[in-house]
Structure formats: C-alpha cells, structure tokens
Image (cartoon, rainbow, N blue to C red):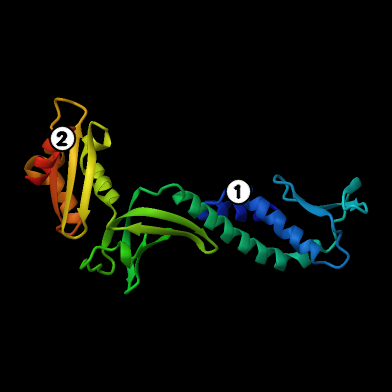
C-alpha cells in the first residue's frame, strides 16, 4: 500500500461523494474479512491502516474460555497478506462502497416527506411511473396519479414526496401528483409572500385533474392574500395551473366566521 492507493481512495471519495473516513473503514473491514478467510487466522483479530503511510497491519488477542479477550495484543500480519487478500478485499470494498452510496442517497431524502421534487419521466406503465431525480428514482404509483393525465417520456414533472423507504437497493421515494400538499408547495414556489409566511393557505380542497379550491389569509393587513396568490395579470396562479396541466384553481379569502367563509367559498 502506498501513495498511489491513497490517491485512488481520495479520487474515489471525491467522485462518489463518500467521506474518506468511510472508505478507510470499509477497506479495514474488507481486509479483516480477507484475513479471517485465510488458514490459521486468529479468531479475535482486526486490521489497522495508517492514513499517512497507508501501512496495513493485522493485530490479534487471545480469548479465554468465556470468549473474552485476554493478554496483550500482538501483530499477526502474514508475510503474503497483501497478495492473498487483494482480490477478496477488492470484492468486499466494492460491496461496502455500494452500501455507502445507498446510505448517502437515503440520507439525502430521509425526512423530506412533504417536500416537492422535480424529475424527468423515465418510464410509465399501468402500475406506476418512474421519475429520474438525478442520483435516485422516484416512484409515482397509479393511485397517486391524476386521472387522464398522460405522462410523456422525458418530460419534466413536479411531484410531492409522500414516503421515503430504506430498501436493500437504496431509497425508494414514493411521490404523488394528487396530494393537496402539492398545491401548497407549488404556491410556495410561485408566491414569495407564502414562502415568507406573510400569506398562509388555511384550507385546501382538491378534485385532482378538475378543480382545486384554496382559502388564504394574510398576517399583514397591507397584503391582499388573494391578490398575492393570483399575481399581476394572473401570472402566479397561471404557473401553478400550467404545472397541473390546466386544473382549475379557485382562490378565496379565509374567514373565521363559518357562514361568511362558506358564502365566499361557494361564490
């Protein structure tokens, strides 16, 4: 092991976005696994890697009858350890790298339920549509799709994250085009007053693909909540309508008086 190996690890860490410490840990685990496959390997043993010199050593301790480590640790590095372990270490390293990449992808999206993402439609059939988000794919089930909305291959689409699952193949991100939360997130993108908290969407009712009605209120008496959402000449609400493929959107002022609120909502 030499500076070339160190350079290779640094390049791999940079290319894959994996912390260098994680790669060192994966390499140590891989070499420990390779050592324990060798004839005569000590049962309780571990591998150390000097990050400065890239020197690899195997240490061991004896075990008593109860399986507890006893005595001093001693160096048991085989003379031909590097040559024998290389192939096994390479295989295990590849596996650990894939695991680290999956964990990083999961951590990127874990806890992001309720966020909005933009993806490119990759594949669609009667069961689901796949959205390419870049490093990962999102699953848009048929039940979360708007009726009569026909996704076109390679078209860009925004969707609402409803669930992030951790699987053996990496994160599975389930998204929706029918969730009312999508409406709120789209308006946050188009209306700065909503993103800043000046205007709030107090209620939302939706019939996906046909009509949505939102009730908005303002925390500033000088800001008209309906006007802020509609925008100059309807520019803001039009952007949301376009993303929803022409779904009609009604915006009404919220009222704490139920009778007044119902009257405005039905008008």
- Residue name at image x 40 percent, y 49 percent: 113
Residue 81 sits in which quadrant?
bottom right
Between 47 and 187, the one nearer to me in the picture: 187
Which residue matches tag 2?
Answer: 225
Residue 243 sits in which quadrant?
bottom left
User: Label 1, label 2: how many angstroms apart (C-alpha)?
Assistant: 50 Å
For the question of whether residue 56 can be seen, the reply is no
Between 154 and 236, the one nearer to me in the picture: 236
Q: Secondary structure at mark 1?
A: helix
Res. 20 mark: 1
Residue 151, position as x, y percentages in the image? 25, 67
Between 29 and 81, the one nearer to me in the picture: 29
Residue 86 sits in which quadrant?
bottom right
| Quadrant of the frame with the N terminus | bottom right
Viewed as shown, does residue 202 lie left or right of 71? left
Q: Secondary structure at mark 2?
A: helix
- Residue name at image x 49 percent, y 53 percent: 106
Viewed as shown, does residue 223 lie left or right of 38? left
For the question of whether residue 160 can be seen, the reply is yes
């Amino acid at each position: 092991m030499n500076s070339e190996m160190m350079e290779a690890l640094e390049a791999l860490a940079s290319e894959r976005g994996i912390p260098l410490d994680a790669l060192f840990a994966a390499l140590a685990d891989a070499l420990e696994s390779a050592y324990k496959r060798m004839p005569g390997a000590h049962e309780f043993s571990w591998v150390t890697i000097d990050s400065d010199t890239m020197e690899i050593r195997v240490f061991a301790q004896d075990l008593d009858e109860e399986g507890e480590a006893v005595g001093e640790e001693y160096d048991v590095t085989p003379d031909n350890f590097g040559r024998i372990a290389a192939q096994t270490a390479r295989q295990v390293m590849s596996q650990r790298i894939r695991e680290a990449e999956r964990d990083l992808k999961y951590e990127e999206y874990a806890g992001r339920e309720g966020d909005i993402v933009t993806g490119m439609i990759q594949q669609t059939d009667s069961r689901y549509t796949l959205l390419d988000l870049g490093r990962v794919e999102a699953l848009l089930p048929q039940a979360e799709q708007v009726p009569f909305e026909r996704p076109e291959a390679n078209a860009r689409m925004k969707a609402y994250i409803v669930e992030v699952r951790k699987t053996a193949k990496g994160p599975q991100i389930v998204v929706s085009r029918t969730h009312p939360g999508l409406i709120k997130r789209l308006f946050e993108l188009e209306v700065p007053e909503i993103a800043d908290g000046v205007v709030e969407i107090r209620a939302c009712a939706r019939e996906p693909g046909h009509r949505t009605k939102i009730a908005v209120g303002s925390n500033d008496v000088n800001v008209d909540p309906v006007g802020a959402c509609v925008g100059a000449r309807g520019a803001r609400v039009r952007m949301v309508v376009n993303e929803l493929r022409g779904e009609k959107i009604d915006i009404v002022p919220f009222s704490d008086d139920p009778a007044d609120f119902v009257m405005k909502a039905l008008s």
